[in-house]
Image (spheres, grey):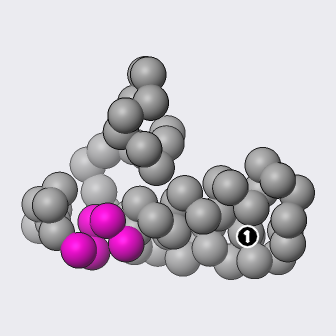
Amino acid sequence: MITPLGSARVWISVSLFGLAQALRLQNKNPAEAADLEARFKRVWAKADVTLTSSCFCLPGT
């Protein structure tokens, strides 16, 4: 069962994605970025959408 978009679990997952992306793009703590990305992949594994951004307000997201 896919969790509704408004649930806390979804937003926590999106936050993991965004934090990992921010750390990676700023070249800050690559080990932490890799850990966050792995955690995100585990919790997002059964999702029926692919994230490309942690902000749905960005063009193309």
Magenta stretch bounds? 8-12
The quarter of the rendered structure image containing the N terminus is bottom left
Q: Residue at x 78, y 49 (%)?
A: 25
Residue 49 in view in this figure: yes
Q: Quadrant of residue 36?
A: bottom right
Q: Residue at x 17, y 56 (%)?
A: 5
Is residue 58 placed above or below 35 in the rendered structure?
Answer: above
Q: Residue at x 36, y 39 (%)?
A: 56
- Bin the neighbour count of mark 1 within 10 Å (Cα to Cα): few under 14, some 14-19, many 20 and up: some
* Residue sticking out furthest to the top: 60
Q: Residue at x 73, y 69 (%)?
A: 33
The residue that disc 1 covers is: 34
Question: What SS does tag 1 mark?
Answer: helix
Residue type at mark 1: give it. Ala
Could you say where residue 14 lies in the image, as x and y percent from the top left? 41, 60
- What secondary structure do most residues of the magenta stretch adopt? helix
**With 3 as the anchor, is 49 left or right in this view?**
right
**With 28 as the anchor, is 36 left or right in this view?**
left
Q: Quadrant of residue 46?
A: bottom left
* Residue sticking out furthest to the front: 57
**Depth check: 43 or 33 in front?**
33
